[in-house]
Image: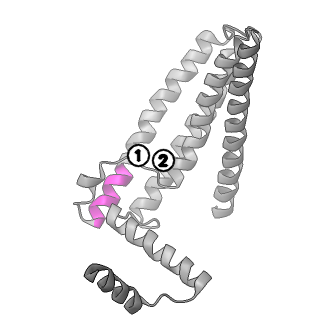
Amino acid sequence: MKKVRELYERIITHFGAIMMLAIALIICLQIVVRRIGITVSWTEEIARYAFVVLCFMVWPVVILRGGDIVVSVVFDLFPKKFRRIALGVMHILMSFCLGLVLYSILRNIAVSGKVGLVSLRWLKLSYIYYFVVIGLISAIIANFTRAFEVITGRVEVLTDAEKSMAEIETTVEQVENEHGSIDVSRQEDNKEGVEKA
């Protein structure tokens, strides 16, 4: 399961990078041709829809990596067990909300399936909606997966302070690996010398 998840994350991350590059190139094309005096109406519309596709396709990876939106000041006050349960319940509720959005977008595809974009009539809106559907289904699965991992304790739910300490420890380990151990007593002596001066 872990290998499938890593493969999925790698594929979506590469897809996201390609989409960002495409959006940047399309916008640059729009700027260049506008300077020349040529009107190209499709560039803005394609860039906007490419960004929508990018957001919905990358969202599940953000969920799986723990990119949760919480008011951390309040959330961090609770005990660790409560934080795990609350976060797990939030992911389950999010899955049900995404299910409603999925139902709505499927109804929208049924109604507007043959409607094309304003500037490119041959490109149907439903083609873009299919990517949104894939992203929503993936986000629902990712939310249930994340809820299971959080509630069962397979993933640690850290406070902001704990995350900061973990980042500092990781940075110190990296520096020590690259440059040897850090002599803390020398740093304190230097700090005292600076304070005296």
Q: Looking at the image, which is closer to me, 152 or 5?
A: 5
What amino acid does circle 1 point to? Answer: Ile
Precedes in sequence: disc 2 or disc 1: 1
Q: Looking at the image, which is closer to me, 61 or 148?
A: 61
Q: Give the x, y percent position of residue 9.
A: 65, 52
Residue 99 placement, left or right of 82? right
Q: Which mark is residue 143?
A: 2
The colour scheme used to paint the residues is one colour
The stretch drawn in magenta includes residue 82: yes
Residue 151 visible? The answer is: yes
Q: Give the x, y percent position of residue 125.
A: 66, 16
The secondary structure making up most of the magenta span is: helix
Residue 100 placement, left or right of 89? right
Secondary structure category for the residue under label 1: helix
Q: Give the x, y percent position of residue 55.
A: 57, 35
The C terminus - image quarter = bottom left
Secondary structure category for the residue under label 2: helix
Q: Are marks 2 and 1 in contact (CB under 8 Å)?
A: yes
What residue is at 61 percent from the left and 81 percent from the top? 178
Q: Which residue is mark 1?
A: 92
The image quadrant that residue 1 belongs to is: bottom right
Q: Give the x, y percent position of residue 104.
A: 50, 22
Q: Looking at the image, which is closer to me, 32 or 48?
A: 32
Residue 49 against residue 91 in the figure, above or below: above
Q: Which residues are magenta?
A: 80-89
Residue 99 against residue 61 in the figure, above or below: above
Marks 2/1: CA distance?
6 Å
The stretch drawn in magenta includes residue 138: no
What amino acid does circle 2 point to? Answer: Asn
Q: Which mark is residue 8?
A: none
What residue is at 48 percent from the left and 49 percent from the top? 144
What residue is at 35 percent from the left and 89 percent from the top? 189
